Amino acid sequence: MNPVSADVRQEVQALREQIHEHNYRYYVLDDPTVPDAEYDRLMNRLRELEASHPELVTPDSPTQRVGSRPQATFAEVRHEVPMLSLDNAFTEDELRDFDRRVRERLGDLLPGGDLFGAEIEYSCEPKLDGIAISLLYENGQLVRGATRGDGYTGEDITENVRTIPSIPLTLRGSEWPSVLEVRGEIYMPKASFEKLNETARARGEKTFVNPRNAAAGSLRQLDSRITASRGLQMCCYGVGRMDGVEFKRHTDVLEALNQWGFRVSRELQVAKGVEECLAYYHTMAEKRDSLSYDIDGIVFKVNDLGLQRELGFVSRAPRWAIAHKFPAQEEMTQVLDVEFQVGRTGAITPVARLQPVFVGGVTVSNATLHNMDEVARLDLHIGDWVIIRRAGDVIPQVVRVMSERRPKEARAVSLPSQCPVCGADVMQAEGEVVARCSGGLFCAAQQKEAIKHFASRRAMDIEGLGDKLVDALVEKGWVKKVSDLYRLTEDQVASLERMGRKSAQNLLKAINKSKDTELQRFIYALGIREVGEATARTLANHFGELEALMEASEEALQQVADVGPVVANHIHAFFAQAHNRETIAELRELGVQWKNVETSAQSDVLAGKTVVITGTLASMSRDQAKAALLAMGAKVSGSVSGKTSFVVAGENAGSKLTNAQALGIPVLNEEAFEQLLATGTLDLGTSDSQA
Ligand code: IVH
């Protein structure tokens, strides 16, 4: 093997230094100075050099954070300095008591003595909700990472902590102690937690109850490559051993740790006296939800290290520190019932009715169960004891069922077959987790959305009937379903807030005008699930009249280009509902009408024509455009040639468009194409082949 040149060694060294510095700025200070792309470039170059010179790879290289092969077990670690816990204060009074005890104990050591209102200086830090960790550095190198365990003996998780980017593998600078044991919390940011659970849910795997459990689970991986993928963070709050260096205050220690490459809390503050501590507590309680990680309280520590020594420890906790807890975000309660709610789009959601419980600062008596898959995943029964979590503004969630406490009389949950609001059939399409009410046109839960869609520009196009007006009409009880729009009187409309006589007349005129419509618009206006404009047009062209569509079987519907089994099922279920049919009949009685369409079976407008589609169309997919062209008798080809009759070009069309232009083949933009579909006549004279 060739000896590695000095140049390469130097470059590797320089790259590592730069990357270490960028890591520090990014992961520890949250203040990156280079764009991600530049960072990636440096990393890639280093990986490349290390790949061609493996002998240059060192354990502290930034490339070595990806994790290593699975271990068999974790070795035991004894903590030379025990990792103790903290006493808790749950109320303001308990915090005041703590402060009083501190002052009384220190007594004469305080300026003026405690009785004369001497105020203690406290370090105020968020209490991170994660896993306590000890990191040991010898001569600036990370040699061991260990869990707290029982405080005296923990587990060696060095391989796992090495994968966490905010943990330095080598200390920064040169002024560090020869032996340094740093303590802090490893936690999973909320965003990483959500992502992890989302992936688990999508795969039907078990989810983690909260970020803390997720962090613990990720750290206890024997395969550190899994740990590496979990987005863990470390924040330091103190030291165990620190040989040969002295500091006066706890916050000085934290500052030094930060200089040596560790992340410390951005929220760290110093308070004089207990009142300032309480003010900090309240500020942080307000801020809690907006932080990117979970905290479960505030830790107050006497800042003067001399005074800390004076105060000492009692049993397993220091007398110089206390955790002032926030209201718990998780509680236990019982499921009294499961009810089903119907959303604005017909989605049917199971909701757990709970024995009211105080959690996350409020009394909770309902929790969403999302859908029946979630109920099955949780294995939730009516009567079960469950763990509820309410974090911030997030809707309360059932995170776990305590199946070991399931009462004998607990009952399984089943999806109702009829909508609890309107009685229409509940449908659940294959492969979909959400069940839906099929009473789209008349279900009270879906009224407003159905009416807004019906009136919209591309549907019945009722000018002036905006969302606010629909809300008001529904709230008055005048419009319960779309057909009621055609029964509105001028007096009714004029009596609404901010509606004059003139605007009422205009609205009625617009409603009246909408009666003359087109079949495809009417089909689209019905708001059948997954029947967008393009599908509505294909259906209109295929069936020609509404009756034929209403009577079509699912098999017949699937004969339509671009209609698959799911859409066929939606259409069939919609027309199977008597109420939907009644509403349609009423609309026709009230004068809604259209001309029937010459069906595509007879349509030969594009017979003998070869068409190429290119670019992105705003109003339909490529497949839908193709289906519409085929329905008109055209052949659709993938490439432009002398045989191409015309090209349909959407946004960002590429070489096909250029080829067509070069060959002088007519080009239809989206507008012209829509014109063709709507009128069934092709006018190549107005195409924009020169555009
Ligand atoms: S100081 C001897 N500071 O809370 C006291 N602990 O209940 C050492 N924790 O096991 C702890 N944030 O894991 C301290 N800013 C903070 C903390 C913190 C979270 C955890 C720590 C400890 C537990 C004590």
Image (cartoon, rainbow, N blue to C red):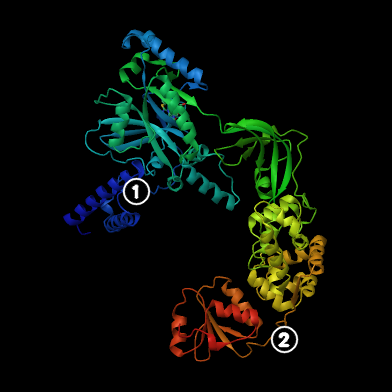
Category of crowding for the residue at label 2, using alpha-carbon neighbours closer than 10 angstroms: few (below 14), some (14–19), many (at least 20): few
Relative to 250, say whether 601 is above or below: below
Q: Position of residue 31 (x, y in %)?
A: 33, 45
**Ligand 1 positioned in quadrant:** top left
In the picture, the quarter occupied by the C terminus is bottom left
**Disc 2 from disc 1: Cα separation:** 68 Å
Give the numbered dot on residue 602: 2
How far across and how far down the image is residue 281, in percent? 46, 27
Q: Quadrant of residue 559?
A: bottom right
Q: Position of residue 35 (x, y in %)?
A: 33, 54
Residue at left 69%, top 40%? 352
The total number of labels drawn is 2
Towards the viewer: 691 or 553: 691
Camera-side residue of 193 and 425? 425
Query: Marks 2 and 1: which is nearer the front?
Result: 2
Residue 281 horizontal side relative to residue 328, left or right: left
Q: Earlier in the sequence, mark 2 or mark 1?
A: 1
Residue 578 in the image: state x and y as whole percent.
82, 62
- Kind of residue at disc 2: Gln
Query: Quadrant of residue 412 in the image?
Result: top right
The residue carrying mark 1 is: 64
Horizontally, residue 127 falls left or right of residue 403, namely: left
Compared across the picture, whether 93 is left or right of 531 comes to: left
Task: Indicate if the residue with disc 1 has its beta carbon within 8 Å of ligand 1.
Answer: no
Q: Secondary structure at mark 1?
A: helix
Name the amino acid type tagged 1. Answer: Gln
Q: Let me know if residue 593 appears in the view.
A: yes
| Helix, strand or loop at mark 2 | loop
* Rendered residue at 53%/91% (across/down): 643
Closest to the observer: 417 or 214? Answer: 417
Q: Residues within 10 Å of mark 1 (few under 14, many from 20)?
A: some
Q: Quadrant of the image for the N terminus?
A: bottom left
